[in-house]
Image (cartoon, helix red, strand yellow):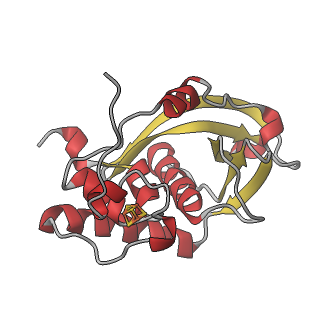
Amino acid sequence: MTDDDEFFPVSCLRNFYFCEQIPYINLVLHVFEPETESMVYGREKHLRFNAQYLPRGIRVEKVVTDVRLASRRLGIAGVLDALVYGVHGELIPCELKHSSSSSARPLLKDVVQLTAYGMLVEDVFGCVVKRGVLFYGEDRSKHVVVFSDGLRRLVVRGVKALRKMVEEERRPANRSLDRCGGCWYSRVCWGHPPPRTKV
Ligand code: SF4
């Protein structure tokens, strides 16, 4: 086991709160969605942090982008889009999404991901992180997420479930059936044929 194997990627935790089957397929079956042209485009056009992505009331002193974070205590690692240094020494993690939030509230998977980054910043920088910001590029919506005890528990519970899933190699019982339409992993879950590959 390498050092990297000790940490679950924060993206796995995010996927766990989208559909529990996806981290099982990734971590146990070792099947990953191949990168599509639109994914490559999204990666290359990766949103760069802009102070306008922050809600009013957050005053910026400094911003560091693409912050690599890992915590042995939490068992997770990932790269945070932007870490804002606010006034009075406050650290505010920010995640930038190309998509829209599709409702007035940010998506749970994104909220848990941001909370995980908040907890990682606390561990790495040895400070208290009380809130973070999610920005959705498509609808330009900005959301302040307060890292409540409940959200922190979702992070811990998710990591614990991932660890158990890998140790026992057992497929989770839960399937997010309302999300199967358009999910690439349906061919693994339901046996649909894989798409034709270009030659
Ligand atoms: S096809 Fe449905 S059950 Fe399978 S991973 Fe996708 S959303 Fe989950």
> Residue 34: percent from the left, percent from the top?
35, 37
Depicted 86 relative to depicted 156: above or below: above
Q: Residue furthest right?
A: 56
Quarter of the figure with the C terminus: top left
Q: Quadrant of ligand 1?
A: bottom left
> Which residue is depicted at the point 62% across and 62% down?
107
Report whether residue 40 is seen: yes
> Residue 101: percent from the left, percent from the top?
70, 56
Depicted 36 relative to depicted 88: above or below: above
> Which residue is depicted at the point 21% across and 47% down?
30
Tell which of 54 and 177 is nearer to you: 177
> Residue 84: percent from the left, percent from the top?
68, 38
Tell which of 138 and 181 is nearer to you: 181
- How many marks overall? 0
Tell which of 88 and 11 is nearer to you: 11
Depicted 105 relative to depicted 126: above or below: below
Residue 59 in which image quadrant: top right
Left or right of residue 12: residue 97:
right
Quarter of the figure with the N terminus: top left
Report whether residue 73 is seen: no
Left or right of residue 103: residue 155:
left
Left or right of residue 103: residue 72:
left
Left or right of residue 72: residue 166:
left
> Which residue is depicted at the point 72% across and 65% down?
105
> Residue 33: percent from the left, percent from the top?
35, 43
